[in-house]
Image (cartoon, rainbow, N blue to C red):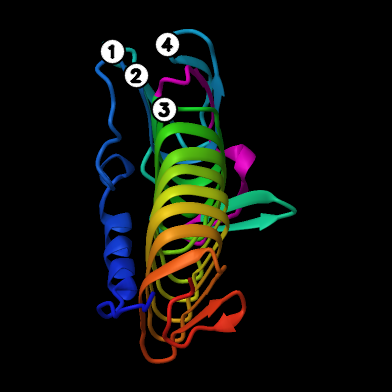
Amino acid sequence: MRATKLNKPRAASYAAVGLMIAFLVPASASAGHPSTGHDAMTLDIEDYVGTLRIIPNTEDKIEIISVEDGVGNLGTLSVSTDEDGGVSVRGAPASLAMNCARTNGELSISFDNGEMHPIGDFPTVVISAPTSTNVRISMRAGDAEIADADNLEILAGGCSRIIANNVTDTFRLTTTGALALEMSGAEVAEIDASHGGHIRISEIRNRLHACLGRTSRLVSDQLTGTAEIYQSGTSRITLDSVTLTDITAELDGTATLQMAGTASDARMSLGGASQAKVSNGITLAHVDLQRAGRLLVDGVRWKGTGND
């Protein structure tokens, strides 16, 4: 099969739009609400700085296990419930001028160039929720552990470290900095990491939509279904094993995409000094190489013909 041309890469423009959205829109609106049933309960965490644990339960309700405010003026939380059993936890809006650092894995945070405080001085919340819960989190800084959920939507800053289990439906992530996130798996993953982030999702079972910029990283052990990928900056995506019906990838800057497995319809546009490395099982339907963009198939530079 002879590959044909695509239009000019749009990765840089997608990254710019994603960055604007990340700063201007709260997590619950960043990509629209996840699809929910009428009986689905929602756990909503907003303006959070601190430690968060969401643990599983077998009850058909969300339960507050413990809520601890921060030391002094480092965070007072408000908790409310609605008639459908949903729970909302809201932190006090913090100063925009925030610095953070990790030493031996321990997070410290300061505001307005003030004294650094360990994460233990900030609020701690433990909540139990059934798997059917839809979870939305807006987290500026802190550590979070999240149990299985139907849908999970996160807006997180660069001082955040998040470990999540399985999402049975849709996972949406918007970053505003170089957060670290590890996840067991999701049916659908929609990721806007145009402002950075190190993200690892072991398994994506149906669809990936990813926009990466700056120094962001995305790794997935197994990806099935379809994929749309837009990269700029020095971003890097590694997909260790894919089984795809189709994939669209648009790269710019010095972005890198590495992918092994099979895809029946791959469309790639590589601009700037970007580079894609794919295995021979990826069937190239359309390729557009601009400027210094490079495509390697099984380590051999692609020179204008299909790889089947």
Q: Which residue is mark 1?
A: 84
Report how far apart the C-alphas of labels 1 and 3 lie in the structure: 16 Å
Residue 150 shows which numbered tag? 3
Q: Magenta stretch: residue 41 in it?
A: no
Report how far apart the C-alphas of labels 1 and 2 lie in the structure: 7 Å
Whether 106 is drawn above or below 285: the answer is: above
The amino acid sitting under disc 3 is Asp
**Whole-percent x and y of residue 261?**
56, 58
Q: Are marks 4 and 2 in contact (CB under 8 Å)?
A: yes
Q: Earlier in the sequence, mark 3 or mark 4?
A: 4
The amino acid sitting under disc 2 is Met
Q: Which residue is mark 2?
A: 41
Q: Residue at coordinates 56% horizontally, 42% vertically from top-left?
A: 183
Report how far apart the C-alphas of labels 4 and 1 lie in the structure: 10 Å
Whether 137 is drawn above or below 225: the answer is: above
Q: Residue at coordinates 24% horizontally, 42% vertically from top-left?
A: 32
Query: Is residue 293 rendered to the left or right of residue 9?
Result: right
Q: Which residue is mark 4?
A: 61
Q: Earlier in the sequence, mark 1 or mark 2?
A: 2
Residue extending furthest bottom?
Answer: 291
Q: Are marks 4 and 1 in contact (CB under 8 Å)?
A: no
Report how far apart the C-alphas of labels 3 and 4 lie in the structure: 14 Å
Q: Over which residues does the magenta segment extend?
A: 111-133
Secondary structure at numbered mark 4: loop
